[in-house]
Image (tube, helix red, strand yellow):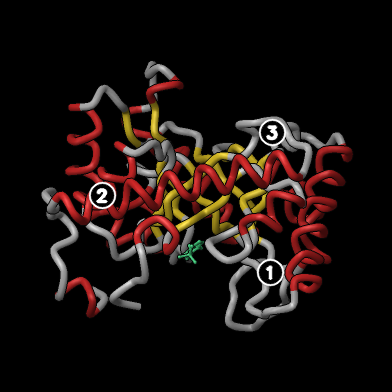
Amino acid sequence: MTAYMDHKDLANETIDANRAQQITDGVHRVLDGIAQAEAEAGREPGSVRLLAATKTRDIGEIMAAIDAGVHMIGENRPQEVIAKAEGLARQCARRGFSLGVAASEGSDPEQHIPFHLIGQLQSNKISKVLPVVDTIESVDSLDLAQKIARRALARGITAGVLLEVNESGEISKSGCEPAQAVELACQIGTIEGLDLQGLMTIGAHVDDETTIRRGFTHLRETRDRILASGEPGTAHCHELSMGMTHDMALAIAEGSTIVRVGTAIFGPRAFI
Ligand SMILES: *Cc1c(COP(=O)(O)O)cnc(C)c1O
């Protein structure tokens, strides 16, 4: 268990009205920012989906975001997925939403809230998250992809995956090397038990917008090459999960289809 989990009850389901209002305002600001960035980039309204990055947030905080219009959530750590999944699914069901892969079958897509894993996944945690999350965004090696596929097949399910690419080259970041991304995606596409849905990256941790943007441009070009390859299993590879609180508008200008936002919705994180 990570230390911060001892300080905060992540399964807490009730928050006060002030906190709920902060989160509501945060969601509205971010949705307005997405709409504005779409318009400035000449993109179709609604072409970018908002994923709330919910690490360190409790169930009450996450439900406030969902009540304010968030329709996709992402967790970094398998432990947090497990601590929150049951309560979140129950609260979502009370509102007529289904959450996560366990509830996705036969559910109305309009009323389904996809649950993504956006942080690193160690192989001994795969079995724990597979029954809960729809999509694993942090697949960055053939080995990990094969391990996820084996466990998905054993459960009789298909796991959604994104290939994470380390576009910034920062050693602190996970993700495959950009030069290997097309080949790796084509290999992952052929694996039974996986549905390759797109690519993910974390923007460079620098102030220079040109540098940040270059990584996003490259991810889009990589996605386009994968789709154009016509290789088996690559036809669904259209998502570009890129853009966070500080680089969301740049990512949208470069074609992002999913922005992962935490701080701008919930405020600064108290832990980690
Ligand atoms: C925390 C996190 C985010 C959101 O970051 P913010 O700067 O708080 O918006 C997005 N993606 C990943 C992988 C994260 O870990």
Residue 139: x and y, percent?
Answer: 58, 57
Mark 1: secondary structure? loop
Lower position in the chain sequence, tag 2 or tag 1: 2
239 and 196: which one is in front? 239
214 and 44: which one is in front? 44
Residue 114, compared with residue 250, is above or below; it is: above
Q: Are marks 3 and 1 in contact (CB under 8 Å)?
A: no
Which three-letter amino acid code belongs to the residue tagged 3?
His
Q: Residue 56 falls in which quadrant of the image?
A: bottom left
Disc 3 from disc 1: Cα separation: 21 Å
Q: Which residue is mark 3?
A: 236
Q: Who's the residue at 59% across and 45% down the image?
A: 34
Disc 2 from disc 3: Cα separation: 38 Å
Which three-letter amino acid code belongs to the residue tagged 2?
Gln
- The crowding category of the residue bearing disc 3, from other C-alpha atoms within 10 Å (few below 14, some 14 to 19, many at least 20), is few
Q: Which residue is mark 1?
A: 166
